Image (tube, rainbow, N blue to C red):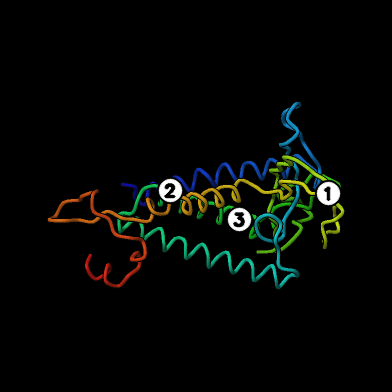
Amino acid sequence: MLKGKHVFFIVLLILIVDQISKVWIKTNMIHDTFLIPFENIHWFRIHFIENPGMAFGLELGGEYGKLILSVFRLVAIGFIIYVINQIVRQKYHPGLIICASMILAGAIGNMIDSAFYGLIFTDSYGRIAKAFAEEGGYGGFLQGKVVDMLYFPLFEVTLPEWMPFIKNRRFQFFRPVFNIADSVITVGVLIILFFQKRLLRRKVETSGSLTSSETIATEEIISPSIKGGE
């Protein structure tokens, strides 16, 4: 069974990979520039952009919007930690714990960017950013931008003229640019959705021993009856 220490190491490993990739991009590339890692593979590129909002370029406008988003992230992180504590304590499926840990790591990874990158780095517009420069960073606390770099333009088509309400006839999939933190959040959520019948169950104790043949549905994860019976 996975325990709290396993969650810690999963989150730590993802955070290390996520932050190393972001710091490398930030200190080696100029904003809105491309890098093609593999010469013959054009459907994957490194495209450095900075996202002031949420995953895949979604954002709330202005300084107050940024603050609201940061508060939302903090609340979400706190809630995810609470849920992980519950599913670990109640011995849910290890796959669910791993997925929840991935979601937590992704949320913390993007929160680090938002909270500290504005203080640490100079801007990346027309120049490569510097860390801890004498001139200071490009923003204040909680005013940082999330570094995105993974870009998969798998294919592009021209939509027919007869399709109404479409201004841009060029359709590209997949257009959004994202990062490792976004990726692990998305993968964690999708695995839970696709395998929820298997993952959203927990083992129960009978006659003082643990049996894997008896399970309880996840709707009871925070039920008072469970809390009272344990």
Q: Which residue is mark 1?
A: 170
Which of the two labelled residues, at mark 3 and mark 2, occupies the earlier sequence position?
Answer: 2
The residue furthest left is 207
Q: Nearer the viewer, residue 172 or 159?
A: 159
Decide if residue 102 is on the left or right side of residue 68: left
Decide if residue 83 is on the left or right side of residue 147: left
Callout 2 environment at 10 Å: few (<14), some (14 to 19), or many (20+)? some
Image point 66% across, 60% down: which residue?
A: 54
Labelled pair 1, 2 in contact (Cβ < 8 Å): no
Image point 44% across, 60% down: which residue?
A: 81
Q: Nearer the viewer, residue 127 or 91?
A: 91
Q: What kind of residue is marked 1?
A: Arg
Q: What kind of residue is marked 2?
A: Ile
Q: Nearer the viewer, residue 136 or 112?
A: 112
Decide if residue 98 is on the left or right side of residue 189: left
Which of the two labelled residues, at mark 3 and mark 1, occupies the earlier sequence position?
Answer: 3
Q: Nearer the viewer, residue 100 or 114?
A: 100
Q: Which residue is mark 3?
A: 112
* SS for callout 1: strand
- 3D distance between C-alphas at marks 3 and 1: 35 Å
Q: Nearer the viewer, mark 3 or mark 1?
A: 1
Callout 3 environment at 10 Å: few (<14), some (14 to 19), or many (20+)? some
**Which quadrant of the structure image shows residue 92?**
bottom left
Q: Which residue is mark 2?
A: 98
* SS for callout 3: helix
Image point 47% across, 61% down: which residue?
A: 80
Where is residue 156? Give x, y as percent. Answer: 78, 43
In the displayed structure, would residue 65 be above or below residue 179?
below
